[in-house]
Image (spheres, helix red, strand yellow):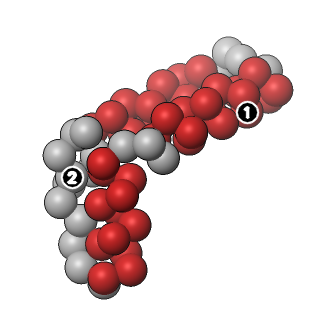
């Protein structure tokens, strides 16, 4: 299952991309990426990838 917070951000970026200029979209994407890197789900994703196991996301 996908991490819910990151999935919501991805969907918002997709919607914003329809009506937003590239520069603004890239800024928003960078802000979301920075926020996502601070989550427990990001740490879990990295640990799971390196450990070659499925990730277990909590939404945090």
Report the residue that reaches farthest toward the top.
19
As helix, strand or loop, the secondary structure at mark 2 comes to loop
Q: Quadrant of the N terminus?
A: bottom left
Q: In the visual, does 16 lie left or right of 4?
A: right
**Mark 1 vs mark 2: in front:** 2
Residue located 82% across and 26% down the image = 23
Residue 7 pos. (x, y %): 37, 39
Query: Taking 40 as reference, is 44 above or below it?
Result: below
Nearer to the camera, 34 or 18: 34
Mark 1–mark 2 Cα distance, whole angstroms, equals 26 Å
How many marks do you count on the picture?
A: 2
Residue 5 pos. (x, y %): 33, 34
Query: Taking 1 as reference, is 6 above or below it?
Result: above
Query: Which picture quadrant has residue 45?
Result: bottom left
Query: Taking 55 as reference, is 19 above or below it?
Result: above
As helix, strand or loop, the secondary structure at mark 1 comes to helix
Residue bearing the label numbered 2: 57
Q: In the visual, does 35 lie left or right of 48?
A: right
Query: Which picture quadrant has residue 39?
Result: top left
Q: In the visual, does 33 lie left or right of 6?
A: right
Residue located 22% across and 72% down the image = 54
The numbered disc on residue 26 is 1
């Amino acid at each position: 299952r996908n991490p819910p917070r990151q999935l919501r951000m991805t969907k918002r970026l997709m919607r914003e991309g329809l009506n937003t200029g590239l520069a603004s979209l890239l800024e928003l994407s960078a802000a979301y990426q920075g926020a996502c890197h601070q989550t427990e789900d990001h740490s879990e994703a990295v640990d799971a990838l390196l450990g070659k196991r499925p990730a277990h996301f909590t939404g945090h």
